[in-house]
Image (cartoon, helix red, strand yellow):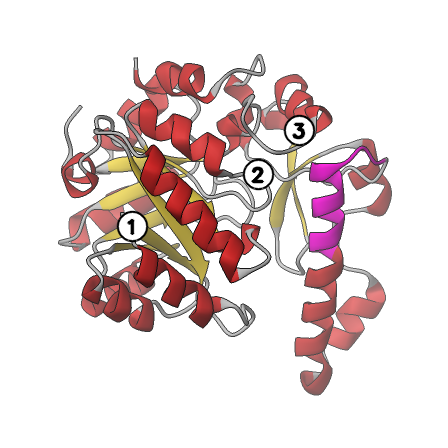
Amino acid sequence: MQTKLTELLDIKHPVIQAPMFLVSNVAMVTEAMKSGIAGCIPALNYRTLEELRDAIQTLKKNKVEGGAFGFNLIVNKSNVKYKGQLEVLCEEGCDFIITSLGSPEETIKQAHAAGIKVFCDVTDLKFAKKVEHLGADAAIAVNNEAGGHRGNLSPKELTNQLSKALEIPVISAGGVGCKADIDKMLSYGAEGVSVGSPFIASIEAGVTEEYKQACVEYGAKDIIMTERISGTPCTVINTPYVQKIGTKATWLENLLNKNKSLKKWVKMIRFSIGMKATENAAKKATYKTVWVAGPSIEHTHKILPVKAIVDKLVY
């Protein structure tokens, strides 16, 4: 299954283990590389730059032929650690960086100077053309079946649109839980896929057994959108706690959001509270179960090693 993505990263299979906040870790990415795919970790999963540096150095030692590793950077002003994280990545080196939520211009310049490829999350053709113009090596087409913060277009519509209009490769993100889904995305014009939710229920994932088991027991029909985590729509498992707190912003948040001078601060506070709730649910047993996942957990029937999950995807 050779594609432009396998050529770009020198990997066996056109699959990226997607970066997942709180979930992705060195153990998962190491097993992904051993299985012939690429693995990616959000830089924000590390509280300090030294912890990030240590992770890069470990992955460099663990790298095997046919695998690749990278990191995800939030490139807008909300990430105060961004410049330091980019500096560490360029100093230590990795195979690729995935940018999200902002202009990738500075990342592309610095990463390319360090010999690192840059893939950019996009949800529409307009932004995809911008990142191509800035020199991105590939566009990650985040569709409406992605977990977490997703796009608005279907996998087919978005991938078709981008693959016809861009010169750079398109990587489809969202809606992949088995090999048939990968074949489908490639038929739409994608050169590879980014897969996240199926790896939550992996033995190597650094989250609670309850979170992993929820991905086994719940399915696509149990994934809903909520505004109660980050202030913008995000997909979560419809647990009893989520049902209890509701999925819409409160009347007070809506009122404050209409005030231009307060809107930014309200969003920041909501994001902070939501991320803390998500972290607590992912890392320890709590009745406040806010578990982020996408509809591709439909294909998750057992907690498995990363290698077994990759085998299900590519064979």
> Does residue 147 show up magenta in the picture?
no
Secondary element type, mark 1: strand
Question: Mark 1 or mark 3: which comes first in sequence?
Answer: 1
Disc 2 marks a residue whose amino acid type is: Val
Q: Label 1: which residue? A: 96
Residue 13 visible in this rendered orientation of the protein: yes
Disc 1 marks a residue whose amino acid type is: Phe
Rendered residue at 58%/16% (across/down): 303
Horizontal side of 288 relative to 81 (left or right) equals right
Rendered residue at 38%/28% (across/down): 32
Location of residue 79 (image quadrant): bottom right
Q: Position of residue 190 (x, y in %)?
A: 24, 38
Q: In the rendered view of the protein, which quadrant contains the C terminus?
A: top left
Disc 3 marks a residue whose amino acid type is: Asp
Secondary element type, mark 3: helix
Horizontal side of 251 relative to 141 (left or right) equals right
Q: Label 2: which residue? A: 23
Secondary element type, mark 2: loop
Query: Between residues 129 and 169, which one lies in front from this camera angle?
Result: 169
Q: Label 3: which residue? A: 222
Question: Mark 3 or mark 2: which comes first in sequence?
Answer: 2
Q: Position of residue 150 (x, y in %)?
A: 50, 48
Image height of 117 relative to 108, above or below? above
